[in-house]
Amino acid sequence: MRSTQPSVWVGRAVVLASLLLALLAGGPAGYHPRPFIIVVVGVAALASAFRPDHLIVSLTMAFIVVWWARDLHSQMPAVVLVVAAALVVAHVAATLLAYGPPTLPVDPRLAMLWSARGSLVWLAALLVWGVARTYSGHGTPTLFWLGGLAAALVGSVAAGFAMPVRGEGVE
């Protein structure tokens, strides 16, 4: 623990805080999870911060998405953009932490690369939100979920092509 680099502690704090923000962002808009759910996500977020390469990160994110999907029904408030941003930030931070052991500091160039990729992926959420708000009442929630999944996939692939990994020995 003492040999853990400060950048790793910052990354862990970002994973923890952004997962909790993703769950609790709807508070001002009237979306309140039960205390039990907050505790479960808090414990899972803490585990995610210390095990960023473990399945717990994906399960925690999926749990948050399922809670929001169940709680929103067919609404599409602006707070979902904050939730999407928090989930992308948590994923990017966990990815950066998973690149090496805690004794290895997070490379700033790698952090910038993944931040740019995350920003491009978040644009997919913005696009889906805009379409959902525009066509509110004209489509079904299932259509928007499928559209969101497709946009996230396209955003991920576009981000991967737009920001390729460059390094020594990579051609």
Image (cartoon, rainbow, N blue to C red):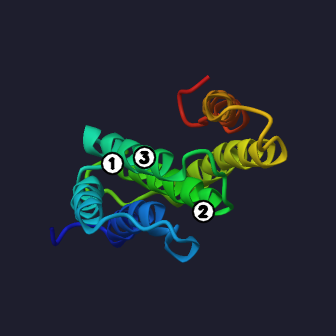
Closest to the observer, 101 or 156: 156
Quarter of the image where one finds residue 153: top right
The three-letter amino acid code for the residue at tag 3 is Thr
Q: Residues within 10 Å of mark 1 (few under 14, many from 20)?
A: many
Q: Secondary structure at mark 2?
A: helix
For this orientation, the residue located farthest to the left is 1
Q: Secondary structure at mark 1?
A: helix
Closest to the observer, 31 or 22: 31
Residue 164 drawn at (x, y percent) = 65, 34
Residue 106 drawn at (x, y percent) = 42, 58
Q: Which residue corresponds to mark 1?
A: 60
Give the numbered dot on residue 95: 3
Q: Is residue 54 visible?
A: no
The CA span between labels 1 and 2 is 17 Å
In the rendered view, would you say 27 is above or below 71? below
Q: Quadrant of the C terminus?
A: top right
Q: Residue at x 64, y 51 (%)?
A: 75
The CA span between labels 2 and 3 is 20 Å
